[in-house]
Image (cartoon, rainbow, N blue to C red):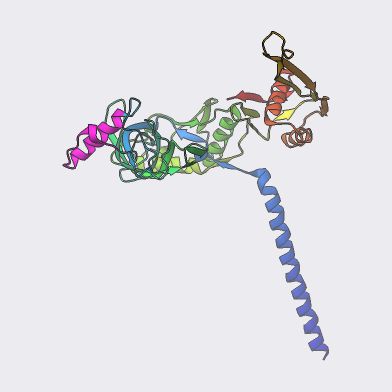
Amino acid sequence: MKTVHLHRQRAKSKIAACQGLVLLGFIVVLLLQDVQPALAQTRLSDLVEVQHAHNKELIGYGLVTGLDRSGDRTTGTRGSVFTVQSVANMLENFGITVDPERLRTRNVAAVMVTARLSPFHAPGSGIDVTVSSLGDASSLQGGILLQTPLFDPDNQDVYVKAQGPLIVGGLTAEVSETRVTRNQTLSATIPGGGIVETNLDFSLNTELPLGLVLRQPNLTNARRIAEVVNTAFDEDLAWVSHAGLVQVTWPQAFQTMENANIFLSIIMEQEIRVETPARVVINERTGTIVAGGAVRIGEVMVSHGNVSVRTQVQPFVVQPNPFAAGETVVGEIPRVEISEEAAQTLVLAEDTNVQQLAASLNSLGLSPRDIIAIFQAIDRAGALRGQLIVM
């Protein structure tokens, strides 16, 4: 019996130990989850471009069909004449001869099609295209782009052919000459709607240093890129030319074209901790404010009060007495009322972050226009530790 009891105790001890290890494992996972956001890394492929591997901007003219009477007008003095001519020319290519003067259609719209072609896109791959109205169409919703060749304006060579249904980010509804529009309906996209026909051959030149061009120039990020490359290969290969360019010497083992692509792939896989610039971006047209997490506010007092001016015209009539000679006089008396609310004041402490600033401004119940004015005043006062950008 003692032996059985001893085995039971040992089994319980093993189970308790296993439970402890599982609990310890959960604690480690939670700690790693807490630490991971603080040590967030960004791949170099999301930060840099290969020098001399420029994207090619393409453009083309096409027709969008399938619109619900929201296309270009084909009659009247303000009608889109080029749309009528384009439809007539297209039908003629199919063996159908139509007098342009007899065309009456609102289901077609003339558009400009644009796309950006990377030097690494091979023939047969798909790219995104953007479609925008050229005539007087009211909406491109529900339209389909007919096959449109996209060419390089510099040499007129066709690189891509685009076609497909449009994805419009807005909405338009019209009933009894009353129209409701949400967002933009005269521009659209076709994800993967452009098929690459041909592209220029791009190859890495191992006789010159590999150039890594930063999409957002930053000296700190450039230094970190050079450091991570040198650490990955345990050799001083990379150096910083300036805030927007890091150059890398090709190692002897990666001189061939096959190995050069492998070398570039290894570099693009490296990760660094990105320094985010302190910026506040303001769009006064839409009342949009975007502030980065690195923005800090120095100690400053903010006092804000609204002043409203109301003007109105009060009519009056002067009627002569009965049987008296005279005329009725009608006039107006202008009145102006000025009201001013009590100022609301808050004091921002030293090194206030974006979250604290947003909470303080929300407590005042301010409109976006008021917040824009406050940000501009804080910047003028020298308390904004960051860059203010007004779009």
**Where residue 222 appears, x then y in whole percent?**
56, 30
Where, by quadrant of the figure, is residue 201 drawn?
Answer: top left
**In magenta stretch: residue 101:** yes
Q: Residue furthest top?
A: 325
> In the figure, is residue 190 to the left or right of 322?
left
Residue 195 appearing in the image: no
Residue at x 77% of width, y 19% of height = 338
**Where residue 127 appears, x then y in whole percent?**
38, 42
Residue 68 appearing in the image: yes
**Where residue 324 appears, x then y in whole percent?**
72, 10
**In magenta stretch: residue 158:** no
Q: Residue furthest front?
A: 323
Where, by quadrant of the figure, is residue 105 drawn?
Answer: top left
- Our reading of the magenta stretch's main secondary structure is helix
Residue at x 82% of width, y 27% of height = 344
**Where residue 199 appears, x then y in whole percent?**
30, 37
Residue at x 35% of width, y 40% of height = 257
> In the figure, is residue 371 to the left or right of 249?
right
Span shown in magenta? 81-104
229 or 342, which lies in front? 342
Residue 14 drawn above or below residue 353: below
Q: Residue furthest bottom?
A: 1
Residue 343 drawn above or below residue 185: above
Count of marks placed on residues:
0
Q: What is the quadrant of the C terminus in the image?
A: top right
Q: What is the quadrant of the N terminus in the image?
A: bottom right
307 or 231, which lies in front? 307
